[in-house]
Structures are given as C-alpha cells and as structure tokens.
Image (tube, rainbow, N blue to C red):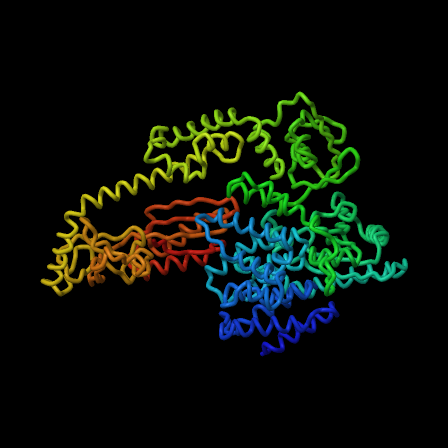
Amino acid sequence: MVSVEERYEHLEKTIRGYNISADLTQIRAAYEYAREHHGEQMRRDGSPYITHPIHVAQIVAEMRLDSESIIAALLHDCIEDTDCSYEDIAKLFSVTVADIVDGVTKLTRVKYSTMEEEQMENLRKMLFAMSRDIRVILIKIADRLHNMRTMEYQTPAKQKKKAFETMEIYAPIAHRLGLAKMKWELEDLSLKYLDPVAYDEINRKLDQASAEHGQFMSRVQEEITTRLQELNVPHATVYGRVKHPYSIYRKMYLQEKTMEELYDLFAFRVLVDTVKDCYNVLGVVHDIYKPILGRFKDYIATPKPNMYQSLHTTVIGEEGIPFEVQIRTYDMHAINEYGVAAHWKYKQGIKREGGEADYEWIRRLLENQEDADAEEFIHSLKVDMFADEVFVFTPRGDVINLPAGATPIDFAYSIHSAIGNTMVGAKINGRMVGFDYQLHNGDVVEINTSKSAHGPSRDWMKIAKSSEARSKIRQWFKRERREENIAQGRASFEAELKHVGLTMSQITASDVLPSILKRVSFQSLDEMYAAIGYGGLTALKAVNRVRDELLQINRAAAMAKAAEEAAARAAQEARAAQEARSALPRKVKSEKGIVVEGLSNCLVKFSKCCAPVPGDEIIGFITRGYGVSVHRKDCPNAQPGHHVEANQGRWIKVSWSDDIRDSYTTGLEVVCKDRTNLLVDISTAVSTCKVNISNLNVHTTADGFAIFHLTLSVTDSRQLDQVMRKIHQISSVMKVNRPAG
C-alpha cells in the first residue's frame, strides 16, 4: 500500500517535470498544514483524509497548473472541514490562494427548495467563480473527478445523485473549458452508476473484441505511418483508440443501434508540427482510404468556442470498417487535451498569458440570465453552454458560432441588439428565408433591417434558440412596452387562473395578497403582469405558485380552526388516555391486527405517509379525535425531531398481533430510465409475486426518466421485499423505495 508521504513525493515529482521554478517550499508547507488540520479524519475507504487533497493536487498538476493552484488544491477542504479560516490561509500563504480555496468551498454550500433552483444557483456560482478566477472551477472539477473515482465506497443513493449531477453539470463544463480527458472520464464514471448494466455490457464486449480491435488498429496505424514516412512528413505521430464507453452508449441510445452497428467505433489521431502539415496529411489519408461524404469537419479554420482545433474526417478501410481520423498540431493537441488549463503555464512572479477577455463568454452567459427564472435559466444555459454548435458567416466573411438549431433571429442578436430589434427579413446564401429557418454550418447570413420596424414579435421568444437572443427580446419588451406587457400579462394570468378554478377575488383579499406577492417574488400584481407580458415568467408558472400558496394558506387556516375546536377536548382525551394507560398496563388487541399498549378497543388507522405492513417496526401516535395513528419507526414524521414538547406523552408503543389481516395497502416509488415496455415489465414482476396493484401513476421527465408510483396489497414486509427485489432486477430500473414522510 502506498503511504501518504510517497503519494506526496509523487506529486512533487510531477510538478518538477513541468515547472522547474515551482515554489516547492510553499507547496510542502501547504501539504503539512492540510495534513495537520485534517488530523484523524478518514475517508469512507478507510484511508486518511489527506489522501484526497493530494490526489486532487495530483490531477491539478497533471493539468500543468501553477504553484498557487497546487497549494489551493491541497488546502481546498480546509475551510469547509477543519477549524482553519480564510484569514489563516491568507496570512500563511497568500490572499490569492485564500480566494481560490474560498471560491471552491462556496460552491458546495448551497441548499434550495427545488432541484431547478439548486442547479441554477450552483451553475450561477460556478460561472461567477470562473469569471473571477478560472482556477476555482478547474480545482473543483479535479475534486469531483477524484470523488467519482472513489464513489464505490458511497451508498447507492449518493452514487446515483452525484453521478447525475456530474453528468448534468461537471462533465459539460469540462467540455466547455476544453478539458477533453477529464470530460471523458467524468462521463464514463457517471455512466457506471447511472446505468451499470449498460456500462458493464459495453466494457464486456470491448474486452471480448480487444484482440480483434488491436490487430485492426495496429494495421491502420502502420499504413498511415509508413505512407507519411515515404512522403517525408516530419515528426508525425499516429495512434488509435476505441471510443469511450459513454460515447458508445450515447450513440447507441440516440441512434437505437447495437454496438456492432456503430458507424465510428474507432478513431485515429495524427500529430504533426505545422498547420500546413495537417492539410497535407488529410490528402494522404483520403488517398489511402475512401472518405465518406459529409463527414469532414475543419475545426482549424473555424475553432470551437472551447478553443478546440483539429481536422476530422471519416473514411472506410479495405475491410469495409469505417473509422475517424483526427489531424492536428502538437500545440493544438495540448490545448485540446487541457483546454483553458493549457494557457496557465506559470512561472513564479510572471502573470499568465492572455487576459480576462479570454473568459468574456462567461460574463455574457451570466448577463443573459438576469431576467430568467430557475427553469428558464437551466434550459438556456444547457443550450448555450453544453449543446453542439453551428458555424455560419457574415457577408464580410466573419465566423459566428451559435447553438445547434439556431435561427436568423439568434444570428441577428449575436451581432447587436439593435440589429435584432430592427430586423425585417433574412437571406441565407442569397435566398430569402423565414425567421424560423434553422442555420447550417457554412451558411452565409444577411439580415435586412428597417428604421420603421416595430421591434421584435412575441413569437420570436418561441423561435430563438440562444439565451442571448431570448434575453435581449425580453429586455426590449420590458423597456418599450410596459403598459402593453401589463395588459397582456393580466389577460394571460386571468385565463390560466380561470382554467384552474380560481378567481381574482381569492388572491386580492387583504389577508392573502401579501403572501401571494412574496411567493411570486414581485412587489405588486402589475410587476408580475409585466413580467408575464415580456416573457420573464409564464402565466402557468405564476398561477401554479399562486395556487400552491393559496393551498398552504387555506390548509393553515383549516388546521388552526381544527386545533382551536379540538383544544377543549384535547386535554380531556389526554387525561382519559393516561387513565386508561394506568388502569390497563397490559397490551390490548385492536380490530386491525395492532396491539396498543395500555388502551382497549381504541380506533386504529395506518398513516398514509409511510403505510406500514406486518414485519415493519412501528410506533403509535394518539391523535386528536381519530384514535391511534400507526407509523413505521423509520418514518420522518416519527423521528425524534417531530416529538415536540406539545406532543410529549402522545407517542405510544404498538405492535403487530398474531392474527393479522390477509392484506395491507402500501406504496412503492420506482425511478427508471424511460424505455418501451417498461410498464409491462414492472406489472409482470409484481404479478409473479402474487401481489395486486390497486393504483399506478407514472410521469416522465424531460431528461428521459420515468417515475412510477404503485399502490400494492401485500401480506407482510417479506412479500413486499420480494416485490422490490423483482422490480430492481428489471433493466433500466435505477431505484426502488418506499415513500415516507
């Protein structure tokens, strides 16, 4: 087993390999400081906690970052998990290091009421941190990568949660920053926990065919190398690889193909010294093999926003096997592997090359989301930051990159908001097209404008793809058409309100309106109407929030009234219960198979929040007027935190009697990756256990998941466990649990 000190010495060796001027004294001091403050803390795998910061620093060093980055990586958990402070780190090391550590720490301290809000704020904070110092997010990605490498020691629930978060946020950000190697590994590790069956199947097939694959790739590599040597192409390096598991999985999932049917399972890279050599090699490859039409991309002439440059071509070999060839210079390869990290070649006392303008796109993303709510923010950001791009040209030949599926509206607003606001038509390659035309790579786009234009149409919000265009359209309506926005917003809101069976008088009551406005985050109804009118909020979402708030208000009023009515008899019931408990200190059987200690012939009901069945550990609660409510002991509503002082003495021991009923109703929640015949498979699994389904609800999510809610009739917990095991064995099922609380 490798010792902690040996791991640190390996880190120093890595640093010396690329940065001879690294401040190893300070790096050693940071290591000793972190080791001292983490003390006896241990990781779930049983190793000392300090091994985690060392591994993170190792990943940072492999990105060839500066000494401050290494130091910050070693200290990145100190503020959060130990007693040291920002001031301590600033004093001992530097303010810059303290800022980086503080930035990494803050990215983990977010808790919000909904998943959308949590994701939105996490992304917003990441973007803000990136705009101030890109090293914050680089260290955070390194931290997440090591955590994913050691995720096997976490609970299945946490594995899936972290894997989903990694796939949704961290891998796409790594892609946007050009960190190709880290992106691939994050995706593969996430797939391992999100769909372990598919992950294992892909790796098994790759292992089975490894010998065959190796022979094919060696032959192609030798053919290309030999031809380049014959033509005296200097310093050319050729190597091949099989696609990563997630890349294969994604193609199989999107294209509904088997692994054997995939078009480009193999990829080869050719590295050369100059751009001229790149295009020469392209000609050589097309001379050796037959190119496939429409499969050539020139990312040297038109680089991707993440700085990626390369020539891509797909060809067919003699065996009829298609494969991809990527051709690039050695400098391009360094940037393609390490992205923004490739620009951080520090020497002590010398600032990095480039300036803050390198990351202007981050600030633009933040500015474009100012008027968006959580759902709109997540949607727009995924489009702008994570989606594929399309490259088009202005009439002057300037290259403009836009999200895939972009329209002339997106193009116009990417040039300037004034162009978009006065647009009256568009030409693509000299031909007039509609505003909803989807742009393609290489299109020449010309926008026709008019001073007499009336501004953008509200329908443009539905057509525009980029958040920049949508944001600028919203801003125009917000600025220019306030009265119109209020009128239109009010009409839309009242229509939706009527649709759900509510009236304006219900929400404008003096005792209700302040809570309603607080819930929708506006100072007045007119402000809300205006936001709906210019597209900052949908009428449906506003009405849903209003309805939820009304339900809470009405529920609170009803509970208060019920409590008031029950207050008089509550004390009497409590006294009666105490007297009964004193008089009958024995267990008395109820009619529902439940034995209540100290009470005879009392009314018993099973709580709907956790739906206990025989075999579950249970506890009873003496309700006000409805007898004893029976809960599972693991139900959140039965936890000590719910045993408030006012309810002391109302929790009571209960147990299952020997002669229980034939069946008990309970529920299951099943989370799956959506596919055809999923409902049939689940129903069959339940049926094989001789269990009846009395109710079933299912809803699907936009990201391809299906969530089933089943109501079952079972005899006891053993039969229920059998059902859960059967369902869990079904392909695509990710989680099966009993709702509680």
Q: Is residue 218 above or below residue 472?
A: below
Residue 199 seen: no
Residue 139 placement, left or right of 318: left
* Foreground of the two, 311 or 456: 456
Q: Position of residue 419 (x, y in %)?
A: 68, 30
* Foreground of the two, 360 or 154: 360
Q: Position of residue 560 (x, y in %)?
A: 25, 43
Residue 250 seen: yes
Q: Residue at point 68% right, 37% down?
A: 414
Q: Position of residue 638 (x, y in %)?
A: 29, 58
Q: Is residue 304 above or below residue 342?
A: above
Q: Is residue 431 above or below residue 270?
A: above
Q: How many marks?
A: 0
> Residue placed farthest to the left in the image?
583
The quadrant of the rendering that contains the N terminus is bottom right
Q: Position of residue 368 (x, y in %)?
A: 60, 40
* Foreground of the two, 269 or 80: 80
> Residue placed farthest to the top in the image?
452
Residue 458 in which image quadrant: top right
Residue 69 placement, left or right of 584: right
